[in-house]
Image (cartoon, grey):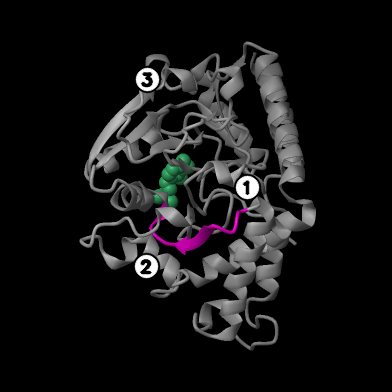
Amino acid sequence: MMARPWNFSAGPAVLPEPVLERAAAEMLDWRGSGMSVMEMSHRGKEFESIIADAEADLRALMGIPANYKVLFLQGGATLQFAMVPLNLMGEGGRADYVHTGEWAKKAIAEAKKVGQVNVVASAADANFSYVPAFDTWQRDPKAAYVHVTTNETIGGVEFHAIPQTGDVPLVADMSSHILSRSMDVSRFGLIYAGAQKNIGPAGLTLVIVREDLLGRAAASVPTLLDYKVMADGESMVNTPPTYGVYIAGLVFEWLKGIGGLPEMERRNRAKARLLYDLIDGTDFYSNPVAIADRSLMNIPFRLRDESLDDLFLKGAKVAGLLQLKGHRSVGGMRASIYNAMPLEGVQALADYMREFERTNG
Ligand SMILES: *Cc1c(COP(=O)(O)O)cnc(C)c1O
């Protein structure tokens, strides 16, 4: 097979190679059906087994309790920015949000279209380089839920502990770190994630929601935006993103095969440590995030001399290291090292960074 470069894209992102190979092998004939998964009826027994197996594997991986529904939706995490308030704000129309960066900002802006948003804490004072301490949050006693962005993909800031919100449901956008490590689902009312970072192809959105939070949407909420309708219809009220569900299922199987989330976490910690140790060991590179809040998945970094940025990126490309340019809002570099990025790829990046510093430092 053709040698593939290392892809550090923030999303859509790298997928596990065994998953792509399996999908290629099954492209024309899914397990004797004579059809590609893309050509199957979503009501047929073949696809029913695909979606049921995907859900069962996800439940096993994450330890999802029986009183939670798993929904396979569309519209990306961005549609969840609207669906969450439309479904959960209730008649009081109030919710708490934590402002940790670009994605939290977008979630807040969308929720404001639906009701009253109270920003309980913001890291704007330090350019979104940390998670505001839980005990400083100014919560609204009437809030229907508390919303957090547990991994800020652009800023590289991650929650490493889960806030206690008592009886108030905690809602989390986990788009860019779901399945990267074990997470106690029972601590959350609702978890959502676009698939294209750690789950599968763009076009699929995962929602995990506690059953008692279903059925709270106003009658005016459109059918497909009502979690209860989607849960009752087992994500098949209309045609679900069938191929995305299939690939996600293969990714879940791959995760189970390597030893589940504990093993994934061990690998992810080793990968992140390699890069953070390198960055912290020199003043040629820097990362602005508070050490305790650094992301294991998205590692933004700057060169001391930003006039070298283009040279760094050009050389990286030649070395087979792609998509390292930082987000346009923050500049610099960013290495996204999701589940499917092997240690070997991160090692190749670290070697390149050391060599670049030696020749340009
Ligand atoms: C990528 C991302 C989004 C947006 O996802 P879409 O699928 O493009 O809507 C939202 N939140 C976070 C944390 C993300 O990383």
Magenta extent: 64-76
Give amino acid for label 3.
Answer: Ala
- Quadrant of the picture in which ligand 1 is shown: top left
* Percent coordinates x, y for residue 301 in the rendering: 56, 24
* Residue 155 drawn at (x, y percent): 48, 29
Gap between marks 2 and 3 measured at Cα: 38 Å
> In x, y percent, where is residue 357?
67, 18
Identify residue for label 1: 179
Q: Disc 2 and disc 1: Cα gap in Å? A: 26 Å
Which label sits in the foreground, 2 or 1? 2
Q: How many marks?
A: 3
Looking at the image, which residue is at 34% across and 49% down?
A: 88
Q: Residue at x 39, y 33 (%)?
A: 102
Task: Give SS at disc 3.
Answer: helix
The reply to whether the magenta stretch includes residue 67 is: yes
Query: For the residue carrying disc 3, how many other residues have a C-alpha within 10 Å: few (<14), some (14-19), or many (20+)?
Result: few
Q: What residue would you read off at disc 3? A: 124
Q: Left of 221 or right of it: where is 155? A: right
Q: Quickly name the residue at label 2.
A: 229
Mark 1 burial class by Cα count in 10 Å: few <14, some 14-19, many 20+:
many
Tell me the distance, in whole angstroms, between the alpha carbons under discs 3 and 1.
Answer: 28 Å
Camera-nearest label, 2 or 3: 2
Residue at the spot 60% in from the left edge and 20% down from the top edge: 292
Q: Can you tell me whether the CB of the residue at mark 1 lies under 8 Å from the nearest atom of ligand 1?
A: no
For badge 1, the amino acid type reads Leu
View extreme (front): residue: 167
Q: Quadrant of the C terminus?
A: top right
Query: Image height check: is 247 above or below 239?
Result: above
The amino acid sitting under disc 2 is: Val
Q: Earlier in the sequence, mark 2 or mark 1?
A: 1
